Structures are given as C-alpha cells and as structure tokens.
Amino acid sequence: MPDTIPANMKPVHGKAECLYESYFRKGENPHQTHYCPGCGHGVALKLLAEAIDELGIRDRVIIVSPVGCSVFLYYYFDTGNVQVAHGRAPAVATGLKRSRPDAIVVSYQGDGDLAAIGSAEILHAANRGESITSIFMNNAIYGMTGGQMAPTTPLGKKTTTTPFGRASHKDGYPIHISEMLSALDGPVYLERVALGNVKQILGAKRAIRKALENQMKGLGFSLVEVLSPCPTIWRMDPVEAQRHVREFMTTVYPLGVKCDRTAQTQPKPAPAPPPPLEELPRLLRIPLEEGPVQRAQAAGEVDCRIKVAGFGGQGVLLLGQLIAEAGMDYGLDVSWLPSYGPEMRSGTSNCHVRLCSRPIDSPLVSRSHVLIALNEPSLRKFLSFVLPGGTVLYNGTEIPEDLRRGDVALYALPFFEIADKEGAAKAGNIVALGALLEATRLLPAEVVDHAMARLIKSEKWLEIDRRALSRGMEAIRSMRTQPAKEPCHA
Ligand SMILES: Cc1ncc(C[n+]2csc(CCOP(=O)(O)OP(=O)(O)O)c2C)c(N)n1
Ligand code: SF4
C-alpha cells in the first residue's frame, strides 16, 4: 500500500491464512476459485476460513467435502481435507471425529448432497449428537449437474426435471431440514442464515463461528443452514440472485435459530483412547507365544490368493473366514472379501481370501493360487482364473471332461457326501478345508483347529467339524495322484 494512505484507512481485509496463497491444485488458473461469479459457495467458504483463523484451530480442522459444486473445496483450504462420495460427509465426519477426538471436523454439503442422497446420514449423525459442525449450503437446486430439482426446490420452480414447475402432488414439498432436525433430541445448535446482503452475511459468519466453538467445547452436533445464491442455474445475475435469496428464499425458509441447547449442554466426556496396537492380539485372543510374525517370516514370502465359490447355504463364507482367521493366527496379513447374491439361500456365493507375509494391497482375488469350487457352475466360472501351478479342489466325484487343465493340481472329492457319513452333510465345507490343508500344506492343522474352536461356538458342531477336517485331509492323502504342493509363494 502507498504510504500516503492513513493507517486507519488501510484495508483490513486480506485472505484468510487457512486458505492457500495460490491454489496450486487448480493448474492453469491458480488465483481464482472455480465458483461462478456471485456463487454463495465462495462467500461461505471465506466465512468458514475466517472463523477458523479467528479461533486459531487451523491445525486441528478437517473439512469433509462432498460431491456437488464444492467438490474442489480441498483446492483452497490448507487444513485437513477428505473428499467423500455423494451424501456421505456426515458418516465420514463421524468416523474422523471418533477416531481423532481432538480434531475439529467440518462437514460441508450442498442441498442435493445433504437432503437427497445423504438424508439418512445427516439425520442419524444429528440424532446421535455427533460432535461435528455441519454447514448445509441450500441453493435449492442441483448446481453441479445442471439444475435438477432438489428436495429443497420451492414449489412452482422450474428445473430441468420439473420443466413445468415443482408440483406438490407429484414432486412433494420442499424439505425444511433445519426444522426437521430440530425435532430431534441430538443436536445442540441449528440455525438458518442467508447470504442475501452484508448484514445476512455477517450473521452467517457469527453462526458458523458459533457452530465451530460448540465443537471446541465438546458440546455436540451443530448445523448451520446457509441460503445461498446460485446465479448460473437460477439464470440471474449475481445482484439479482442475492435479491432472490433475500426476498424470496427467506419466505420459503425462514431465518433464525431453530434449536439452541448450548447453555444447558454439558461437554461430552472425551472418549477412551484406543488400545495400543501391540495390545490387539491379546484383546482378540490371538495366541502369541510362538511369535507368529517371526514364524511367518521363517516360512518365506507367502502370498496365497484363494477363491472359494459355491451357492448360499454351503458354508462358502465361513470356509473363507476360517482360512483367514487361521492365517491371522499364523502371523500372516489376511483379507477376506465376501461376495454373494441377494438371495438368502441358493444364490451364488463366493469369497476372496488372501494370506500374505507382506501388507496386502487389495483384498480382491481375480487370479488365484487356489480355487475351492463347491459346485460345477463355480468351477466353470473360475477355473480359467487359477494361476498355472495352482490347486483346484472340486466338490464332485470327477472333474467334468471339458474342464480339465494340465497345469494345475485338480482334486475332485464329494465333500458333502464325505461329511454326510460323519453325521452332518453341512460340514462339507470343513471337509474341503481339510482337503485344502493336505493338498497345499498352506497352514498347520493345529492352527486351523484353534481358529475353528474360536469361531464355532457350539460344542456339538465343533466336534463334527473336527472330524470333517480330518476326513478331508485323509481323503486327499488316500487319493493323491500328484505330489503335494508347497505353500503358495509370491
Ligand atoms: C452416487 C452419485 N449420484 C449422483 C451423482 C451426480 N451428482 C453430482 S453432484 C449432484 C448434485 C449436487 O447438488 P448439491 O448437493 O445441491 O450441490 P451444488 O452443486 O448445488 O452445490 C449429483 C446428483 C454423483 N456424483 N454420485
Ligand atoms: S452452478 Fe451455482 S452452485 Fe455451482 S458454482 Fe455456479 S453458481 Fe455456484
């Protein structure tokens, strides 16, 4: 500034410090935001940034931004940021706040995001009284996608999906989120503000600041609904759009505090710190005496990918879970990814299991070392994805002729018939597990037995399953025509 300007007349407005000096993530134009001229998002974010600066909480703030025009919020805020799927900000904010109680977590959402696809998330987060600050940008339209009707669109408004105007008899009524949430016992503070003129904007800043302070005091859930102009989709110039907020939006959505329990609310007790990582094996009752990690290391680089497939009711998922649990007991990193059809019984069911002596990058098993196919359709579907040198265990008396492969070890055994002879055909999945152990020597039987004892709660079933496990191992021993495979290696 030239020195000729008296000190008391120098501009006092600058950029908030929690905003990046230059928006480097934006690439070609790092000095302006992506918002349209006159958009309320730009104003609200400035207010939020100023409040964060004033409260000195920048290092603690994590902003959760959604899908919608504010999707690039993380371009601007030099704070913690998480960009989430459409409507999920309150759920992610809940997780963040619970795992990082010291963080100040801000969930920022548009009205399509919060009041349509995310309506359940906000309702339950508010009802649980999560200690988060929610900023709800209500511009009564889907901005980013070109102007479809939102749950908040006023009656009579023309949108791309209501070209003749929103009609209550087919489109329902505008949802008043703040009033709706005020019927719950969970929230501590709900206020609707607007960006229709300077006075309203200052009011919005005060409300945002208060919502943040509530969180700093540990009081619970606060939401500020901001009536916000969207000049582009409303087809108005910025001045007209501001007037529309002032003169029309506020008649549909009356401003004011809808709930304020801050005076009578006690700060929530801080949650107990999570147990130290090294305590987890003890809490999960994983036997540690033999040093599972060292054992796994001694066993070499294990990376075994297993696909178990069949139909619902065959115990496909339990079988995979037992392998994963036993692998974990053995000191390996494991993953278990179930995948099944919507039917309760007889639909397709499969699971992906990985046992690895390194951290697992993805739980998805597309090409496997082992396939346990509990029916023919599963064998047909997944056989070609078994890696050469792999092992296939098939529930049947013989492998169908057109499904034979010379580069994998194929075992056909009627697992469920074998289990039937032990008194429970249902234990066929455990016969298959025994066959797996014998055919691949992937894990010691005692380790699997230990995992079974933990997972199978009924004494009667545990006894049957132990017999079934032995029968499966014996069956492979007695039929083996090919040498046993070594455990799968990377
Ligand atoms: C699961 C999913 N469904 C739909 C979309 C498409 N979509 C992107 S933004 C949006 C609406 C955003 O409107 P609003 O939350 O009001 O934010 P605004 O753009 O007006 O700020 C929709 C439907 C998506 N990205 N993801
Ligand atoms: S479309 Fe509307 S909400 Fe989106 S940036 Fe432009 S003015 Fe803002």
Image (cartoon, helix red, strand yellow):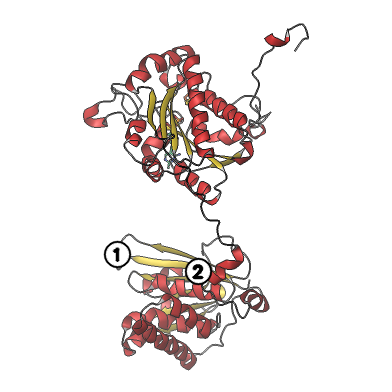
Q: Amino acid at mark 1?
A: Met
Looking at the rendered structure, the secondary structure element under dot 1 is: loop
Pointer 2: what residue? 353
Q: Residues within 10 Å of mark 2 (few under 14, many from 20)?
A: many
The C terminus lies in quadrant: bottom right
**Residue at image coords 47%, 13%:** 237
Q: Residues within 10 Å of mark 1 (few under 14, many from 20)?
A: few
The answer to whether mark 1 is within 8 Å of ligand 1 is no
The N terminus lies in quadrant: top right
* Mark identifier at residue 196: none
Q: Quadrant of residue 158?
A: top left
Q: Position of residue 71 (x, y in %)?
A: 52, 35
Name the outermost residue toward the right. Answer: 3
Q: Position of residue 317 (x, y in %)?
A: 41, 70
The answer to whether one can see residue 222 in this image is yes
Q: Is residue 424 left or right of residue 142?
A: left
Judge whether 259 appears above or below 480 on screen: above
Q: Amino acid at mark 2?
A: Val
Contact check, label 1 and label 2, Cβ < 8 Å = no
**Residue at image coords 56%, 80%:** 442
Q: Position of residue 87 (x, y in %)?
A: 43, 41
Looking at the rendered structure, the secondary structure element under dot 2 is: strand
Q: Is residue 300 left or right of residue 282?
A: right
Q: Nearer the viewer, residue 241 or 367?
A: 241
Judge whether 6 appears above or below 61 on screen: above
The answer to whether one can see residue 106 in this image is no
Q: Position of residue 324 (x, y in %)?
A: 50, 72
Q: Quadrant of residue 261?
A: top left
Q: How many marks?
A: 2
Q: Earlier in the sequence, mark 1 or mark 2?
A: 1
* Mark identifier at residue 344: 1
